[in-house]
Amino acid sequence: MEQPKVGVFLSDCGKQLSEILDFDALTNFVKGVPNVALIARGSEFWRGKGLQTIVDAVKTGKINRVVVAESITKVSDVNIAQAVEDAGLNSYLVEVLDIKDHCAWPHRNAPKEATEKAKAMLLSAIERAKLLEPIEKLEFPALKSALVIGGGIGGMQTAVDLADLGFEVNLIEKQPFLGGLAARAGRFFPTDDCAICIQPPSSDVKTITHTSRKCVYRSGLSEIPNLNILTNASVVAVEGVPGNYKVTIEKKPRYVDADKCVACDKCVSVCPVEAPDEYNANLTNRKAIYINVPSVYPQIYTIDEDACKFKDCAKCVSACPTNAIDLDQKPEQVTYNVGSIIVATGFKEFDASAIKEYHYDNYPDVITNLELARMIDSFGPTGGAIVRPSDGKPAKKIVFVQCAGSRDRRYNPYCSGICCMISLKNASLIKEANPDAEVSICYIDIRTTGREHEYYYERARDMGIKFIKGRPTEIYADEEKGKLIVDVEDALLKRFLDLEADLVVLATAMVPPEGTAELAEILDIDLEADGFFKEYNAKLRPTETKQKGIFLCGGATFPKDAPTTSLHAHSAALKAAKFLNSGKIVKDLRTAIINDEYCGDCEFCPVMCPFGAITLEPTTENHFVARVNDLLCEGCGVCVGTCPLNAIELKNSTPNQMAAQIDALLSVNGTSKPLVLAICCQECGHTAVDSSGMAKMEYPANVRIIKVPCAGIVRVNQILEAFKAGAQGVMIVGCKTDGCHYEVGSEKAENKADSAKVLLKEYGIEPERLEMFKMVYIEGAQFAEAAQMMTERVAKLGTLKLMGDS
Amino acid sequence: MLHHNVKKAEAISFSEEVTCRHGGETLTACYQCGTCASSCPVARLDSRFNPREILKLALLGEKDEVLSGDAIWLCTSCFNCQERCPQNVEIAELIFALRNIAIEAGNSPNIYADFGGALIADGRIVAISKFVEKKREEFGLPPLKPVGVEDLNKILEATGFTKPEQKEASK
Ligand SMILES: Cc1cc2nc3c(=O)[nH]c(=O)nc-3n(C[C@H](O)[C@H](O)[C@H](O)COP(=O)(O)OP(=O)(O)OC[C@H]3O[C@@H](n4cnc5c(N)ncnc54)[C@H](O)[C@@H]3O)c2cc1C
Ligand code: SF4
Ligand code: SF4
């Protein structure tokens, strides 16, 4: 490679820095550093004329490495990198350091010491710049197609959005019909209209206005040319990488040919077999061949495999006027190649039979809100009548029990969030249809947090629905009265009530549907402790996962109402579209590299990599070596910190580069205090240093900062080497455990600090000389405090004596 | 009904005092749902006792009211409440913890002093009464003999049972 020719650009930020730092001394110092080909001083270098100076020097070939001492590095970094790249030099050959916030301002009352620290910082940046390597870009085609898993209102809306944007979309649903929970819930708050309507595709020529809403059955979903809908289908395998997945889908037989069925219902009239109607909460029976309700999508009959007698009966086959029934259909596997995957698998009601004292499994008149919704629905099994399932008689006294299995540490500790609203809605619907019904709601707290939601609570009170603040301890049957008794304390009156009920409705918790864990395994994405899919970042990236090409939507991440599900659906579609839009994936190859010679047969890094980017592959000599997938690697270096054989390096954060920087940082002290090295992660740790400087908080200039991609990259031997290089104390500053930008880095760093302390003791070094800190940007004050504290602590311990020192 | 003023500083210190105790750790998990109260056989019969209310008072720092009244002594330790509490509050254990605090504050009800006295004197919690002796005779059972209490008393003294207040003060 060409000899490094470093250009050093020193900005005094409009003279404010030269009032503190001795710029002549800095210039003279830099002049003496080998390989420095150019020194320029100016007011600012990240824009305008200053930036042009850099560009010109690069263009003329005077320099091939750029070091800029600036004030607002987080903005200038990007600007300078882009300009340098445009001028023909790889943007990774630039090093920007913050001499204002990391030096001049925090040490403004000790200008001499600050100048010495600035020298060390400049030297460190120059030494690093010399060792920097250009980083190329990885580019390969991405498929402009997607797989949406789950055909509820979330999945359907995502699918329509993506299809509208021109992507090839495959929507798969494991049930024979689309709609998910909404297909069963009847009416929805907060609009009081039907649950099962969506915004039709813009390809719909008859969509009159852009605000139009349509029931799923007339939405024209099936006619969108680039939307392929598969029911009775689930994912069995996924291979490939973001942008290029190969998905294998298993499709259960429907036994009815979709192209021939005309939904005439003749098959149903001849079918002799009855089975409980799951769709209608088992409140009635249906035939073995059925559709849920006439308006379902797709309007094609299906056969219940468990109930049908097949060849022993086959009455439907001869009754069908179009020969649509095929009892020989077999499960099929189909594969799709897609660029991204959207998980929209929703949630389900918690099985309340776990709460023994509520007797859900043995009292037929104890039901759930979803079961009640089927009764309220005028197309439902009771034609809209609210009855006691035990004897079919009208239910006059109805008691709702909130938080059944939610906010309960024995089952689901979380608040399911939507069940208060569901009960308020259902209670009001009952009262509206039967003003004489006595309806009570037993609650711990009523939660109505959306727009219009509190109105449902108000309206319910207005309608005469009674509210009892108390969680029932037991539901029991009073045989004599033929009623259920709900045993509850009204905590506000401190009075015990035995509420008589014909029907008890449990507002059950909402939990992940069956198959969630298996799907997470197939997709290699994480679940939260509650069993729902884990959002990559709950605050900023609620529809993303740790896998770049896999997105989440709706109830799959946590119970949600329809408005939030819609928001999520559109967000997931936008994220997937953004990811695939250009038809290619471009990524900087700032990745981990394995040294095959050292690597062998251990499994640390594949397990530790937060992004699943490392796999083990067999070699010809029957060994295994780690392989990094460049596309998946995020360049955090957690693997580097984990490898016991030092067989992995991260480009531009190699041990050599870091050692050169550390040596430089510790080469000049200029203060009477012991040198403390602060290894800061580039995310929260380093920004906490920024913010302390920006706020002009003071800490001693003997504290020297080195930036690493993630605290997880730090290796135990590097810590030891830092002491050897002259550090009297070492701080590791990372993100908060839960807020680590690379999931586990901060936690791993903490573990390493702990083991390093044990080793330090062995070497006769006081373990207190090393400390791990976790902070966020706004905790600049904590950084200044920690730096001060470490300085004092180390000073008290006296000068470090290393083994071998005389 | 509850008519209590929240006295902040004191509230913190009393609920902390309780949560530091063995058995008192789970106090702050209570969200006042009342499952314990409606599970409680005593609360149904005697309005002086309501486990939910006791926890609320403890949470609000109403130390005197909790420790001086009869309420905490009425619990029969049936553990019905504890079985059903959705927040895993160890209600019955909490009541033991509150009783211990009350005893240390010199607030044990007479009946407990009677029990203690009987144990020291006769080695039994319930003294042998005329009634019991008569019943035993009717059933053809031999009369109860006094048990030796010398050894027992050594244990009771060594463990501080005989002087509970002093035991606390010496800590
Ligand atoms: C009783 C009740 C009443 C409600 N009332 C209201 C209301 O009034 N207002 C309101 O705003 N919200 C209400 N909701 C919430 C509303 O139903 C949800 O917000 C909405 O259904 C979420 O949509 P979704 O697509 O995310 O999930 P779902 O509706 O659950 O759909 C998920 C779909 O994915 C399918 N699926 C699951 N796993 C797989 C798999 N592995 N492979 C393939 N397919 C799979 C399921 O079969 C289902 O069809 C109610 C919910 C309930 C339970
Ligand atoms: S929404 Fe209401 S009923 Fe549901 S868990 Fe939360 S508080 Fe309980
Ligand atoms: S049952 Fe538990 S949470 Fe509910 S009031 Fe009693 S102690 Fe509190």
Image (cartoon, helix red, strand yellow):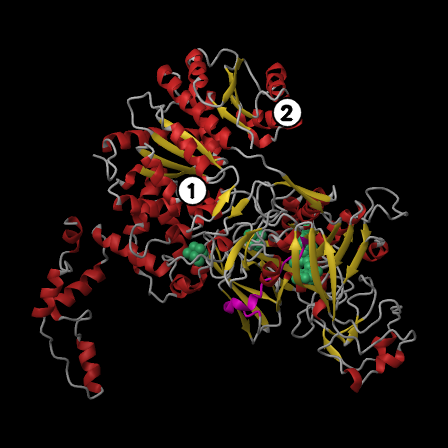
Q: Looking at the image, is B145 positioned above or below residue A143?
A: below
Task: Kindly identify which numbered label has been placed on residue A714.
Answer: 1
Q: Position of residue A19 (x, y in %)?
A: 44, 11
Residue density around tag 2, few if under 14, some if 14–19, many if 20 or more, within 10 Å = some
Question: Sequence order check: which comes first, mark 2 or mark 1?
Answer: 2
Is residue A628 in view from this perspective? yes
Question: Disc 2 sits on a residue from what chain?
Answer: A
**Mark 2 element type:** helix
- What residue is shown with label 2? A83
Look at the image and tell me whether residue A468 can be seen.
no
Residue in the picture at 28% in, 29% down: A792
Residue A524: quadrant of the picture:
bottom right
Left of A120 or right of it: where is A48? right
Q: Relative to residue A585, is residue A133 drawn left or right?
A: left
Q: Farthest residue to the right: give it.
A: A321
Q: Quadrant for the C terminus of chain A, please.
A: top left
Which quadrant of the figure has residue A768? top left
Numbered range of the magenta stretch: A342-360
Residue found at the very far bottom of the displayed protein: B140
A271 left or right of A774 in image: right
Considering the image in quadrants, where does the N terminus of chain A appear? top right
Marked residue chain, label 1: A
Amino acid type for the residue under numbered disc 2: Ala
Q: Nearer the viewer, residue A316 or A552?
A: A552
Q: Which of the two residues, A698 or A287, is positioned nearer the viewer here?
A: A698
Which residue is found at the position 56% from the left and 54% from the top? Answer: A526
**Residue A144 on image: x %, y %:** 76, 48
